[in-house]
Amino acid sequence: MQKGMALMKCSDAARLMHEYLDQELPRDQCKLLQLHLRECPQCQARFRSLERTDALAHALPSVSVSGDLTDRIMKSLPKSRKPKVWTGWVQRHPAASAAAFFLIVMLSSFVAMWNQDEQLSVRGDLEHVVIKGNTVIVPAGQKVAGNLTIENGEAQVLGDVEGNLTIIDGHVTLASTAHIAGKVKTVDRALDWVWYKVTSWFDTVAYGS
Amino acid sequence: MKPIETRLARLARKGDQRAFAEIVDLYKDKLFHLAYRMMNNRQEAEDVVQECFLRVYKHLDRYDENQKFSTWIYRIATNLCIDRLRKRRPIYSLDAESSDHEGLDGYAMMPSDDRTPESELLLSETQQTIHEAIETLPVKYKSVMVLRYLQDMSLQEISDVLDMPVTTVKTRVHRGREFLRKKLEHKL
């Protein structure tokens, strides 16, 4: 039996040497290798140098890292992990995200349209008013027939208005001589503006004016 | 009870910055050592470590707690090193062919004065030889050898980190070891 072990091929012995260095060689195979090495000086030399290489490689000293690396790493991190949570939500709820996105686009275009409308516009009886720049003046002694609506402008009323006076995004100055038969209404915000649009539509439907 | 890194990772995932700083402290030296042996350049090694932690931080949600945290973080770091080495290779081969094109091929962008840190470590001549031998290994052997010898990983752990069969890892360790032995032969 022992003779057979000694007849192990050198190439097989080399494989066993590596497995031994991997710490994966079973005990009985260790014995086989030992026997071969005892009889084969070449393999013995090879084993010695492999063992030495292995030990030296393991012993390579570790390098020190510069002291402020932790600080630099912590500073390089994004401030909060929250955005990740947000995108995670988007990934999990694609339909809701699409709906929300659509809503945002609609709202922003609506607001944009509302903001675009910055020119002065006057509706009503234009024959009895004077327009100076951004100001609509109802001169003293003049009588405006029906409603007067002013968008994006100032109103200065010295005379009479026989209907309602509505000012959208502007101010109204009433002189002591002014007389307004209907209501005076100023609309400032987008929501009020919407409300105004809705009620005026209702007025149109209800009274046909 | 989960291992400490897993618990820290869980805290960090909830936004606890101090827990993440502890993870950094636990791993920065090991990862730097790994990256330094792979890149053989201090600055690049630091860049790799920094990028690695940034990725870990960003992808904490993807960390699977059934896996060892160390395996996960080492995988990220080794992949970063391998990517960088692969990108670097054509630059070196160009350089080997002709030095006339220096500056045109991007070689000049590599800070060469950073690449001589061994002197500061006062390595013995044989250690120096081993280090140089590791440096000349092809990337696929280098990563296996660095994990095996400088991180003391078992073959199984290396196979998990590099996502390849244990038998492949084994073959590469054996060949790598033979390569080092031959390099050392006339020095010993």
Image (cartoon, coloured by chain):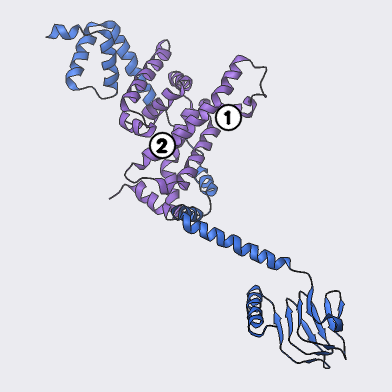
* Mark identifier at residue B74: 2
B184, above or below A176, in the image: above
- Say left or right for A51 vs A107: left
Question: Which quarter shows the C terminus of chain B?
Answer: top left
Mark in the foreground, 1 or 2: 2
What shade has chain B been given? purple
Given the image, on which type of amino acid does mark 1 rest?
Asp
Q: Do tags 1 and 2 sit on the same chain? A: yes
Q: Position of residue A43 (x, y in %)?
A: 28, 9
Q: Which mark is residue A98?
A: none
The alpha-carbon separation of the residues under discs 1 and 2 comes to 24 Å
Please tell me which residue is depicted at 43% across the width and 24% down the height of the picture. Answer: B140
Residue most extreme to the left = A1
Compared to B28, does B81 lie above or below? Answer: above
Residue that badge 1 annotates: B114
Asked if residue B152 shows in the view, the reply is: no
User: Would you call the spot at circle 1 few (<14 residues within 10 Å), some (14-19), or many (20 or more)?
Assistant: few
Name the side, left or right, on which A151 lies relative to B53. Answer: right
Q: Is residue A81 visible?
A: yes
Q: Which chain hosts label 1? A: B
Q: Is residue A142 above or below residue A6?
A: below
Mark 1: secondary structure = helix
Q: Kindly identify the residue that appears in the image at 50 percent across and 57 percent down.
A: A97
Q: Which is nearer the N-term, disc 1 or disc 2?
A: 2
Query: Is B61 or A196 nearer to us in this picture?
Result: A196
